[in-house]
Amino acid sequence: MPLYVRDERVNQLAQQAQKILKAPTKTDAIRQALERVVETPSETAVREKKASLEERIERLRAKYDMPPYESLEHFDEKAFLDEMWGDNDVHR
């Protein structure tokens, strides 16, 4: 069943959505946008249960037996790069 958009503003929004979502057609862009707005409660619950970035990083640290971030030794990237390029006489 074809989708006919008669309102010019809605048509412009559909075109913008198509570019943003990289959808092949305006109809597909509208479908994707509507699916994001009209979610089932279970999909919303799954999204809310997603762990925060901090929690995911902590799980990775535990999985690979990495020390806590705070205990890591300071790394001076500028000094490292200066030494790598032979600029050892640069004032710090």
Image: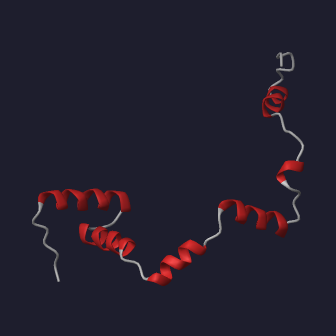
Q: Residue at x 61, y 71 (%)?
A: 50
Q: Residue at x 13, y 72 (%)?
A: 4
Work out whether 74 lies above or below 33: above
User: Hey, which quadrant is residue 54 in on the image?
Assistant: bottom right
Front in this rendered view, residue 87 or 77 = 77
Image quadrant containing the N terminus? bottom left
User: Hey, which quadrant is residue 23 in on the image?
Assistant: bottom left
Location of residue 27 in the rendering, given as x and y in whole percent from the top left corner: 25, 71
Location of residue 28 in the rendering, given as x and y in whole percent from the top left corner: 29, 72
Left or right, 77 with respect to 45, comes to right
Left or right, 51 with respect to 75, comes to left
Q: Residue at x 11, y 62 (%)?
A: 7
Image quadrant containing the C terminus? top right
Location of residue 75 in the rendering, given as x and y in whole percent from the top left corner: 84, 38
Left or right, 2 with respect to 14, comes to left
Work out whether 1 lies above or below 62: below
Location of residue 11 in the rendering, given as x and y in whole percent from the top left corner: 18, 61
Front in this rendered view, residue 77 or 61 = 61
Q: Residue at x 87, y 60 (%)?
A: 66
User: Hey, which quadrant is residue 74 in on the image?
Assistant: top right
Check the image and tell me how it is coloured: secondary structure
Front in this rendered view, residue 40 or 15 = 40
User: What is the count of numbered marks?
Assistant: 0
